[in-house]
Amino acid sequence: MCMSAITVLPLAAEDHAAWFPLWRGYQAFYNVDMAPDVTAATWARLMDAAAPMDGLLAWQAGQAVGLAHTVRHLSTWSIAERCYLNDLFVEPDIRGQGIGRALIEAVYARAAAAGCGAVYWLTHETNATAMRLYDGVATRSGFVQYFKSLA
């Protein structure tokens, strides 16, 4: 695909067929396979205006080429809500064209419009390519994540 304009738009119900392959690609990147009920619940939450979740698709030449999912939540560290950038994915063969940056900038704009005081996210320590982008659009917090599954 040649470089062309990138448009980032909120997810809409008619976008499921465009979103699903990107969602699967994101999972493949992290070597996970979400159960169908998790994928169905994720989509339903992204479509529920009352849920604190939001989704965006990046479009280039009429094709969905990237996605971002966010979760807004309260914080003990501020009065304003925080926005967690839960998922970010761009088709591997077209990375480096500004699509990830466009998605992040759209997340920033939507979070600000929703009254959030900050946007934050995690990435795997081996994801050096993504970290080069992230270092240019945000500040590393220095925090280390700990995780305990309760399932």
Image: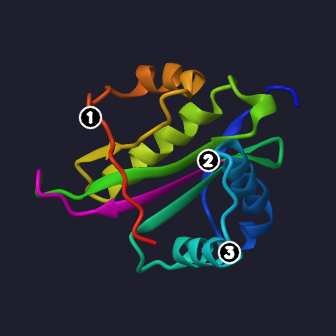
**Mark 2 highlights which residue?**
8
| Figure label count | 3
Residue labelled with disc 3: 13
The quarter of the displayed image where residue 74 is located: bottom left
- Is residue 74 one of those drawn in magenta? yes
Distance from Cα at disc 2 to Cα at disc 1: 30 Å
Q: Is residue 126 magenta-colored?
A: no
140 over 74 or under it: above or below: above
Helix, strand, or loop for circle 3?
helix
Give the foreground label among 2 and 1.
1
Q: Amino acid at mark 1?
A: Phe
Per the model, the C-alpha gap separating discs 3 and 2 is 16 Å
User: Where is residue 7, by image quadrant?
Assistant: top right
Pinpoint residue 127: horizontal percent, then vertical percent. 56, 28
Residue type at the position of mark 3: Ala
Q: Is residue 134 left or right of residue 141?
A: right
In the rendered structure, which segment of residues is drawn in magenta? 67-77
